[in-house]
Image (spheres, coloured by chain):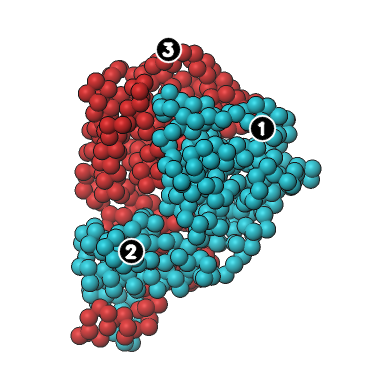
Chain colours: A cyan, B red
Amino acid sequence: MREGDTTTDIKASGRIQVRYKRLLALTSYLFTHPHTQWSLTELSAALHVAKSTLSEDLLFIKGILEETGQGTVVTHVGAQGGVMFVPALDRVRASETLAAWTARLTEPDRLTADGFLYMTDLLFEPRMIEPMGELLAFPFRQQKVDVVATVETKGIPLAMACAKALGTDVVLIRRDSRLSEGSAVSINYLSGSSRRIQSMSLARRALGRESRVLFVDDFMKAGGTARAAADLLGEFGAQVVGAGVLVATREPTHKLIGKFWSLLEWDETLSTVVPSVWAKDLCAERKGDTDDRH
Amino acid sequence: MREGDTTTDIKASGRIQVRYKRLLALTSYLFTHPHTQWSLTELSAALHVAKSTLSEDLLFIKGILEETGQGTVVTHVGAQGGVMFVPALDRVRASETLAAWTARLTEPDRLTADGFLYMTDLLFEPRMIEPMGELLAFPFRQQKVDVVATVETKGIPLAMACAKALGTDVVLIRRDSRLSEGSAVSINYLSGSSRRIQSMSLARRALGRESRVLFVDDFMKAGGTARAAADLLGEFGAQVVGAGVLVATREPTHKLIGKFWSLLEWDETLSTVVPSVWAKDLCAERKGDTDDRH
């Protein structure tokens, strides 16, 4: 075996073949169950592998995942303990998708006759939106976000992708209160861009007290929607730890909400869409930067 | 080395370690890029691996994925050719999630004072909705679906998950036409359950002619929404190849749309929610059944 090439190695040893198979099965299992905490007992039952073998395999995979910048396996000790796969930000995919967004949003027919930037189609393409949700989630990884909130409708896929990357759920703020959701808290507000009275509403049962909330939407101009959402969430005793959008207009530079994170910036005057500085910087960082770990 | 245990095998051979690493990196790459066709040239550039090595690795991984029922690697030959990872339906996860839905939807406080089944929270939990999208996509895997359509709002996460499993995108039907989406086709219809006039609208630019469309929604009672959506999609020359919902009411048994697929059935009289027969059967099938392959 020492003299053989890798193929011969594999063919030569059934034992190694078995271990490859176990490692690949475990790897794919981790990738399909990110941010899920498992006790070794549960994992060993699900994969039909002895616990001792599993610990060893997990350590081995953790090393490779970290070395290749794909994430890590976090171990929590104690009665509530277990292991959890935390995927790293896929910077290459995020960077390529960011470039695809700028290219597609600057296609000449993207502007409607009324001067709106048409992007509904792109917001509903899984491959275009998921890497953007992961990117938007990144600054909030250490913020102990309990839940992502969005106002219907177009920000929903981004909010879902963002929540998935944070291992949380989405709370949906409606434009009208719905009979099907029971009693709700509603607020009216003056939309910054359209200067019209708008309303939004959240079912009482939708959000627990004292939640730490990340607000996500597809688009921000004056920031009136984000401001109103923060006010509405405040009625539930929630703390808005941040606001993130896919596209923000360059003007007005002063938004009605303080700090916000946008992945792309649209300059209406110049008709350009460019990645924001932080998003670009984040994509450009080297793999395995320490802030990418839990 | 022949006498060592697997740990010794690994420690003993740097060459094997390198191959493990390459295989795990490739496996995780495939899992994060499902339904994406790559030429070997692209893949070899992305992973910094020689093409010949890559072909061999792909064949090896394909074997393990198929054997463990996790999916397959499809190879298309010719100029437009390449390789693509097609994940199999994760029946264990689908089955567990289906059970979680029935348990959570029969919690006593799920019924609102007005007799609606509250499920908005669950529809927006990534872990609850993604396996359901995969399950709902399954019957349509061979149907050459071009696009998944849904009517805003609550069916969006299910539609996105379903589209992802089919490797397609979602087209969003609005309740009102939006200035920001340009000209649109709208229809009015009589809602089967509420007996009110409702409308829905689709931007002209949102859907190409002659598309094969799968309609997805969270809930179906009389089927009026699905019927209206089919009519609206018909205005675009689209063919609706199927309709799928998360929950359908048992009554009326005759819906306004012919054939439909629901994952769960809600009996309003008995206040029970149970998995549909086809969904249960699908989860119970053995791993690696041939219809699970492309």
Please tell me which of labels 2 and 1 falls first in the chain: 2
- Looking at the image, do the residues carrying marks 2 and 3 touch, with CB atoms under 8 Å apart? no
Q: Secondary structure at mark 1?
A: loop
Measure the alpha-carbon separation of dots 2 and 3.
Answer: 52 Å
Q: Quadrant of residue B128 in the image?
A: top left
Q: Amino acid at mark 3?
A: Arg
Q: Amino acid at mark 1?
A: Ser
Nearer the observer, A169 or A111:
A169
Callout in the foreground (2, 3): 2
The residue carrying mark 2 is A83
Determine the residue positioned at 62% across, 51% down. A261
Q: Residues within 10 Å of mark 3 (few under 14, many from 20)?
A: few
Question: Mark 2 belongs to which subunit?
Answer: A
Nearer the observer, A211 or B27:
A211
Does residue A91 sit above or below A210 in this rendering? below
Residue B157 placement (x, y as % from top left): 44, 39
Does residue B115 sit above or below B196 in this rendering? below
Q: Residues within 10 Å of mark 2 (few under 14, many from 20)?
A: some
- Looking at the image, do the residues carrying marks 3 and 1 touch, with CB atoms under 8 Å apart? no
The answer to whether residue A132 shows anywhere in this view is no
Residue B37 placement (x, y as % from top left): 48, 53
Residue A25 placement (x, y as % from top left): 30, 62
Residue B111 placement (x, y as % from top left): 32, 27
Does residue A25 sit above or below B174 in this rendering? below
Question: Mark 3 belongs to which subunit?
Answer: B
Nearer the observer, B2 or A74:
A74
The residue furthest right is A269
Q: Amino acid at mark 2?
A: Val
Asked if marks 3 and 1 fall on the same chain, the answer is no
Could you say which disc has been placed on residue B195 in the image? 3
The residue carrying mark 1 is A191
Measure the alpha-carbon separation of dots 3 and 1.
Answer: 33 Å
